[in-house]
Image: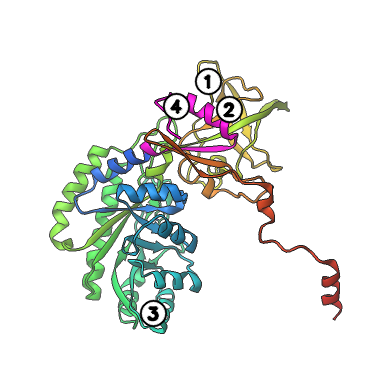
Amino acid sequence: MTILKEPQDTRLRRLAEQLETPLYVYDGDVIEDRYRLLTSCLPTGFEVFYSVKCNPLLGVCQLLRQLGSSVEVASAGELLVALEAGFQPQDIIWTSPGKTQRELTMAVDHGIYSINVESVEEARLIGSLAIERGTVVQVSARINPDFQPAGAGLKMTGVPSPFGIDQSLAVDALTEIAAMPGLSFIGLHVFTGSQVLDAGVLVRTMEKIIQLALELSAASGLSLQFLDLGGGFGIPYFPGEQAFDANQLRLELGELWYRFKDRLSGMRIGVESGRFLLAESGVFLAKVLYVKSCKGTKFVVCDGGSNQHASSAFLGRYVRNNFPMRLLDKGELETEEVNVVGPLCTPTDVIGQKVHLAPPESGDLLVVERSGAYGLTHSPVLFLSHPLPVEVLCYQGEELVLRERGIAENFLRGQQSFQQKEVERAIHV
Ligand SMILES: Cc1ncc(COP(=O)(O)O)c(C=O)c1O
């Protein structure tokens, strides 16, 4: 549907009325803007790999492909979405610590650009799949370095973690992997953490990764065609947090590249990003069902909660504070402290703890901002069997429902009915 220019809140109210709540609304123009901003900060030739895990909607992936992004997947489901979205195998990489044989087979059969292996054992398995098929598979090694990005919301390296090959074991591991039949060793991958807001930290981390890559390459005698510098590009969620300084990032990355470009020339260089590209594009909309007080605390009970927006309930701890939230069209009113909860029968279903909202009433619309990344995809959607929310993308004046609202019957799909008689027979045989 084509919609002429309309204030954002008018659009949200209209969509909530037309499509009902709970609802995710994404702004594709913001996604485009973020993508262009990020690429403008990178030296020429650097590539952005969209991390599907942050929002695996097919339509979102299609938009990013259309914008020129490559893609990073972490499961067979994400690979399927990426292929369906039209990404070419040479623009797909796969990073995740627990790839199954079935998943690796799929990656091998599709000939993706790089399977980023996280252990020697995984490489061996890929090698055997390659030999079975009479093919050669491109792999990179994910390294878990001894350093970590200062101030990151989530650190994945420098501490014991299941991600990648420990730096202290890397030279031997690379030598072993590169010698395996069926494999073509092409490069290195390092992802140190997420939600970094300091451009200087981002650049210094990339510098350490480049230095590490050059050291490992020299020590193992292996040349690199691909270097994935990870990312961790954050966004401000809370008052007092500031977006990273894009100009500083552009300038300092440019200088970094100038210093290293000769030694990295000819290499495909990538960064990965999910949160930065998506988070600010999306809002989660839920309807206030009831407002009640219990032992001195006011509760605002909504039709969607942590089952559909777990990050807002601090599940996962990427974000350690309340998401920015408000009641639609009540921005001018004085606020009061409330707990915003969802419909689940658990005290952890709190998507806003002691937040300040305008006086809530049933029928109000709650808007949780910055919810475009790690929203629905990061949520325990099976808990209490509520249908999945609708997800809508607004882009260049068009509105597209990218995921229809689920129905209760979906929860029965794939289940077998319990046949008492047959079970009894089986037990007594
Ligand atoms: C290997 C890897 N790449 C990319 C990402 C995406 O990070 P972000 O959404 O912060 O950009 C993650 C997030 O956990 C990750 O583990």
Locate residue 91, reporting x and y percent.
Answer: 32, 60
Q: Contact, CB < 8 Å: mark 4 with mark 3?
A: no
User: Real-space Cα distance between discs 1 and 4?
Assistant: 11 Å
Q: Earlier in the sequence, mark 1 or mark 3?
A: 3
Q: Is residue 15 magenta?
A: yes
Q: Earlier in the sequence, mark 3 or mark 2?
A: 3
Q: Contact, CB < 8 Å: mark 3 with mark 2?
A: no
Q: Contact, CB < 8 Å: mark 2 with mark 1?
A: yes
Is residue 45 positioned above or below 176 on the image?
A: above
What is the number of the mark on residue 365? 2
The residue under label 1 is 329
The residue lying at 45 percent from left, 57 percent from top is: 81
Q: Contact, CB < 8 Å: mark 1 with mark 4?
A: no
Q: Earlier in the sequence, mark 4 or mark 2?
A: 4
The residue lying at 50 percent from left, 29 percent from top is: 12
User: Real-space Cα distance between discs 4 and 3?
Assistant: 51 Å
The residue under label 3 is 130
Label 2, residues with CA under 10 Å away: few <14, some 14-19, many ≥20? many
**Relative to 289, is 219 on the left or the right?**
left
Tell me the magenta residue range.
1-30
Q: Earlier in the sequence, mark 1 or mark 4?
A: 4
